Image (tube, rainbow, N blue to C red):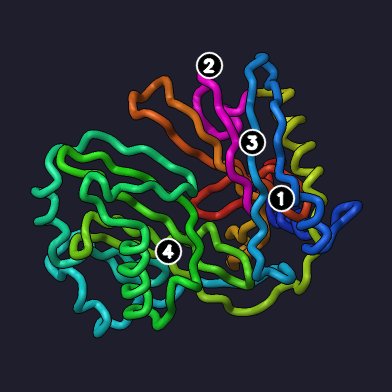
Amino acid sequence: MKRSIVTLLTALALTCALCLPAGAETLAELRQETAGGWHETLTDKNGASVVIDAEIDIRPGAEEVSALRVSPGPPAPESRLEIFDSSYSGRMNENGMLSQLSPTMLQGLEKLGAFLGAEPQGRKIPDVTGTGGLSYEAALKTADEIVNHLFGTSMKDYELESVEIAHWENRDTCRYEFSPVVGGLPLGSAPFDLDVRSQEDWGVSFVLYTVDGVETPDLELAPFAKVQETLKAALARTDLYTLMGLSPQETPASIENIRLEYLTFADGKRILLLPAWVMDVFYENEEEEEGPQVNTLCFSAQTGQRLKRKDGLYQPVP
C-alpha cells in the first residue's frame, strides 16, 4: 500500500509538471522576456548575498518544445570499437552507456607529471596551448571524428555544456562536457564527456538515449518570472547551498549561466524529456581545498518549480 501511494504521488507530481501555468508563454515570447538576461543580487534567509549576473540562453535552432518519450540507447556496434583500448578494464559499451579510452591514454599519464588540481570554467573556453595543452579547436576535431565513427553524426549535433581545466606538473589539459541536441534543445541529462590530454591521448564517455516518440507536442512554458519568484521564495526560507544539497557555508556564490534544456523525468516505467531551466552556481567549498566549484540548480520550464535529481532522473520539489 505504501509503495502504491508513493507511486501515485510521483505520478501526480509529474502530471502537475505537465499542466499549463497561468500566463503561459510560447518559446518566441520566452525569448523576448529573457533577452536582457538576469542581473540582480538576492539575499538568503541568513543575510548572505547571491549575485546573479547571467545571460539566458535559448538555443536559436529551437522553434517549439515538446514532451518526448525516450529509452536508453543501444550499445555501439563492436566493429566500431577498434579505435579504443581493448585492454582497459573500465571500458563499457551497453544500453545507455559507453565509456572508452584511446590506446595510448594510460601510457600518456606519465608525460603529464603529478596532478595539481582541477578548475571548473563553466562554459568559458580556456586557452591551454601556452602550457602545451590541446586547443579547443583541435579537441573539437577529435570529438567530431569520434562521434562520426561511432554514430555517424557530427559535433554540430552537440552543444558545449561545461569545461574543466586539469592542472598537471608538465601542462594543463581540459575535460569538455557536451550535450546532444534533441528537438532543438540540449539534453543536459545525456552528457558526452571528452577528457583530452593530447591528440592521441583521450577518454570518452556517453550517456545515450533514443527518442521513441512525442508525448505532448508544442508545450506552453511558464514565464521566466515564475522561476525568479520560486528562487527568491526558496532563499527567503533557506540558503543557496542547502538548495544545492550541500552543507551551509559562508563563502559567496554566484549564478553566471542560465540555459533552457531538456532533462529526463520518470513517468512510471517510462522516461520523458521535459524542458527545464539549468543554472550554473559558482562557489568555493570550505570543506574541500579544491578551489572554485560549480553546481547546478534546475527548475521546470512549465511550472517554475524547483527540481531535484535522483538516480539520474528529475522530479519537482513539493
- The amino acid type of the residue labelled 2 equals Glu
- The amino acid type of the residue labelled 3 equals Asp
CA separation in Å, label 3 and label 1? 36 Å
CA separation in Å, label 2 and label 1? 36 Å
Left or right of 290 in this view: 31: right
Q: Which x, y percent locates residue 209?
A: 49, 70
311 in relation to 266, above or below: above
- The amino acid type of the residue labelled 4 equals Val
Q: Which x, y percent locates residue 217?
A: 76, 74
Q: Secondary structure at mark 1?
A: helix
Outermost residue on the right side: it is 23
Q: Which residue is mark 4?
A: 207
Q: Nearer the viewer, residue 20 or 259?
A: 259
Q: Which residue is mark 1?
A: 9
Q: Which residue is mark 3?
A: 53
CA separation in Å, label 3 and label 4? 31 Å
Q: Please report whichever mark, 2 or 1, sits nearer to the chain's N-terminal start.
A: 1
CA separation in Å, label 2 and label 4? 35 Å
Q: Quadrant of the C terminus?
A: top right
CA separation in Å, label 1 and label 4? 28 Å
Q: Is residue 250 magenta?
A: yes
Q: Magenta residues, as a range? A: 239-259
Nearer the viewer's eye, disc 1 or disc 4?
A: 4
Residue 4 visible within the image: no
Report the disc number at residue 132: none
Q: Nearer the viewer, residue 274 or 104?
A: 104
Q: Quadrant of residue 297?
A: top right
Q: Which residue is mark 2?
A: 250
Categorize mark 1 by other alpha carbons within 10 Å: few (<14), some (14-19), many (20+): few
Q: Please report whichever mark, 3 or 4, sits nearer to the chain's N-terminal start.
A: 3
Q: Please report whichever mark, 1 or 4, sits nearer to the chain's N-terminal start.
A: 1
